[in-house]
Image (cartoon, rainbow, N blue to C red):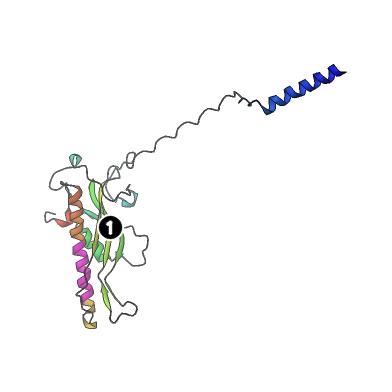
Amino acid sequence: MRAFLAGLLLLTASGCSHWLGDEPQPLALPLPPLPPLAATAPRPGEALTLTSTTSVNTDAFSSSSEPRRRCPDELLPRGASEAALPVRVTDARTDRREILPLALRTALQGPTKEPAELPRYFAELRVERYESPKLFRRLSAPRSEWAPGILRARLMVQDAEARATLCQAEVRFTGDAREAPIRRRLREMTRNSLQQKLLTGTLAQMESALSGISSVLRLRSQTTDQ
């Protein structure tokens, strides 16, 4: 009987040492196969082509969040007519409570011979912010004052065949209304004058933006050889 109890105690102690003292070994189970890698998405414009340049929808073109990108001048045409880009204005504002005037859009685009047709390369001006010149009065201010007008946009050179943005630069212009008269009889004339300054300044900024990213291209609306 004593021998039986001694053997039982020895067996119990051996089992406890297995659970308390020894580290459990991991099971050697086969791992499931890894899922196949997703195909890399094509770069913007790689798989998009056009069969015609007529009635191009500029909203479908790819764009980048980077504010400035130089043009691939070595790949672009250098002829006098091919390098002069027509301009298309698109309204990309998130807040459109204030109307973007048709007269301003037309003036920014400039005259075109074939308004319904675009060549392979053209410039798109995507307006992201517009504030027209207006007379207002600050709280507790002794007199009214003019807001000079603001236009923020992105000038993008588009490839109509690849539907891709080749290069882009920011366009920013804020007018100057510090000397604008506030007399009632001059308000309409002052408003028109400030609007004209906004247009002229924006056109100059567009030309400057394009010359900063390309030494080959220019805007057709800014040239006389149309």
Q: Whole-percent x and y of residue 168? A: 25, 49
Count of marks, rendered view? 1
Image quarter of residue 32: top right
Magenta highlight range: 189-201
Closest to the observer, 194 or 140: 140
Q: Whole-percent x and y of residue 31? A: 55, 26
Question: Badge 1, how many Cα within 10 Å: few under 14, some, many 20+?
Answer: many
Viewport quadrant of the N terminus = top right
Q: Secondary structure at mark 1?
A: strand
Viewport quadrant of the C terminus = bottom left
| Residue at horizontal 28 percent and vertical 69 percent from the top | 132
Q: Farthest right residue? A: 1
Closest to the observer, 21 or 95: 21
Q: Which residue is mark 1?
A: 153
In-image side of 114 versus 1 (left or right): left
Image quarter of residue 73: top left
Q: Farthest front residue? A: 2
Q: Main secondary structure of the magenta part?
A: helix
Q: Whole-percent x and y of residue 56? A: 30, 50
Q: Is residue 15 visible?
A: yes
Image quarter of residue 128: bottom left
In-image side of 212 versus 135 (left or right): left
Asked if the stretch drawn in magenta spans residue 149, the answer is no
Closest to the observer, 100 or 15: 15
Q: Whole-percent x and y of residue 44? A: 33, 42
Q: Is residue 157 visible?
A: no
Relative to residue 178, is residue 76 depicted above or below?
A: above
Kindly identify the amino acid type of the residue bearing the numbered disc 1: Ala
Closest to the observer, 177 or 62: 177
Relative to residue 21, is residue 47 depicted above or below?
A: below
